[in-house]
Image (cartoon, rainbow, N blue to C red):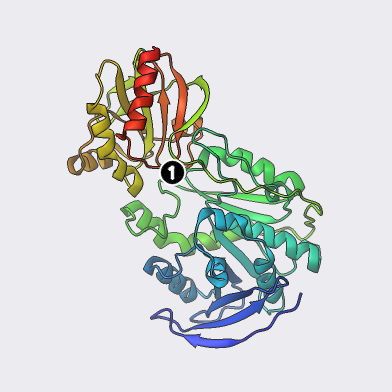
Amino acid sequence: MHYLIGLCFSLLLSAAQAESFYLDTDSGEEVTVHQYPATFSDRNKPLLIWFTEGYAERNSFKQLITRFNDAGYDIWQIDLLESYFIERTPTNIRKLKGDGVAAVLEHAQQQAKAFIPVSTGRMSLILLRGLRQWQLAEQPQKGVGKMQQTVLFFPNLYNAPEKAGDAPEFFPIVSASSLPITVVQPSEGTFKWKLPELVDALQQHNSRITLVSVPKVRDWYFLRRSANEIEKQASEKLIDDFGKWLAVATEQSDNKFQPQAEIKAAQITTGKKGLVPIQARSATDFELQDTFGKSLKFSDKRGKVILLNFWASWCPPCVKEIPSMNRLAESFDAEKFEIVSVNFKESPQTIREFLKKVKVDFPVLIDQDGKTSAEYEIFSFPSSFLIDANGQIHYSVNAAIEWDNEQIKQQIQTLIDDN
């Protein structure tokens, strides 16, 4: 692989001057790498190569980089969509190839320091693609060269489900990878219940996995604009915790990594919009408490059509659709139609405070551990289901919609009449 490097200087952080250089990939695209040097050089600290997803300009991330620099870490920050001038969408992230990552890793291998690639969310998928491409093309010693570890924060390695309720599938790169990987999974994160499946898939080609659980925080906890106190405290501890995680995950000298040479092509899917009809299936029963501790068993609602809605107060589209849901509920006889909402992993106190500000005319149940959401295969918010009086799911929605439009009301009326 050949590359060209050009230098320019710009002030991206108040605490440190960022130097940028450019790498040409085999496909002819140019990758911009922003360098943030350590405040005080520490040869024992690895270079962190952070592949971001559009949050590089957030103050929370800038402050995080400064703290890493102050702790002796050099950082390279790369945003591939920004480098390629591609619109920032989940589908476009999933479509990215790995050659940009591979070019950065090849350049890192030529530096004096050991290095650690870092990614978040969907960008972890592209990092794995690039790592495999680099391993196969460059054949680094023991499959990793100077790379000490790969750190994936709350990785989203799934193809997009077409509709709410579909079980998401891993991309083929997951089981084709062979790497030392540290997976950092917040206890309140969306993919908590999928961790065993993730570990099984990653280990198919001898990846060595270290799991880290960060208690009582959500995904993106150190990047949130509206972080709660526990998330702020966890973010403050991140630099120290990062060093501890790396110490635990230190590779044994006899480990050798070899990714799968052949891999099947992945068809990128996109979610269907609006109210989507599905083959009727039984709604999973559950029992949850509302914000005041009163239990509700979902099967007790049999006999009426139900709109079952999964949401969170930190999700703007979820909040935006609530007024139309209130209006929808008013349009029907409460003995024949009802809305039941399930809040994802927020505390009763948080939701009680929310309900003081936002009018919600239907029950709000608390899925404190996320297990009910996982049973319904919920991986984006809001997600909703229309369920007939016999407990059969007929429609799903994988986004926010205006619930009180006439077409939806007509479909609900049809379910009521069929009963």
User: What kind of element bears circle 1?
Assistant: loop
Residue 36 drawn at (x, y percent): 51, 78
- In this view, the residue in front, 243 or 331, is 331
Residue 188 lies in quadrant: top left
Residue 259 drawn at (x, y percent): 77, 54
Residue 405 drawn at (x, y percent): 31, 35
Left or right placement of residue 402 versus residue 179 in this view: left
* Quadrant position of the C terminus in the picture: top left
Residue 202 drawn at (x, y percent): 68, 47
Where is 386 relative to 161, above or below?
above
Residue 232 lies in quadrant: bottom left
Look at label 1 and name its amino acid: Glu
Residue at 62 percent across and 66 percent down: it is 116
- In this view, the residue in front, 402 or 128, is 402
Label 1 environment density (alpha carbons within 10 Å; few <14, some 14–19, many ≥20) = many
* Quadrant position of the N terminus in the picture: bottom right
Residue at 58 percent across and 39 percent down: it is 168
The residue under label 1 is 188
